[in-house]
Amino acid sequence: MSDQEPTANPAYQKGFNEGYIMMKYLPQLAEEISKGLGDSDRSSGFKDGKAEYQLEKAKEHLPSWLKRDFTKKDVSNDKSERTKGKEADRDKE
């Protein structure tokens, strides 16, 4: 097994890049083109690239607390971290 990421099909990758760039600079044209595409690797890549750009654009408008990656473990969300402050307050009493 190699440590490198698997490479995408060149036709899919080219379509993905075209869809992403076209959606960024010519969104109306990208929408029209995607309606007429078939089921090739390149057209699948085009549609996925277009969707990726839309997803990234939507994330820009989110508040910062929604932009973080919730799949990573956050130490401050650990129960032991949250209860430390409560235990310290009890000791003071």
Image (tube, rainbow, N blue to C red):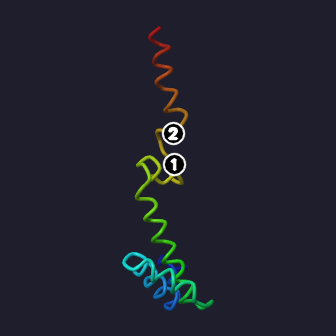
Q: What's the CA distance linking mark 1 and mark 2? A: 8 Å
Q: Is residue 43 above or below residue 56?
A: below
Q: How many marks?
A: 2
| Amino acid type, label 1 | Lys
Identified at 50% across, 84% down, the residue is 7
Q: Does 85 appear above or below 10?
A: above
What is the x, y in percent for residue 53? 45, 71
Q: Is residue 25 left or right of residue 3?
A: left
Callout 2 amino acid: Asn
Q: Label 1: which residue? A: 73
Q: Could you tell me which quadrant the N terminus lies in?
A: bottom right
Q: Secondary structure at mark 2?
A: helix
Residue sitting at x 53%, y 32%:
80
In front: 5, or 77?
77
Dot 1: element: loop
21 is higher (above) or lower (below) than 52? below
Seen in the picture, residue 58 relative to 47 is either above or below; the reply is above
Return the residue at label 2.
Answer: 77
> What x and y, as percent, mark residue 4?
47, 78
Q: Nearer the viewer, residue 77 or 38?
A: 38
Q: Residue furthest left?
A: 25
Q: Is residue 28 left or right of residue 44?
A: left
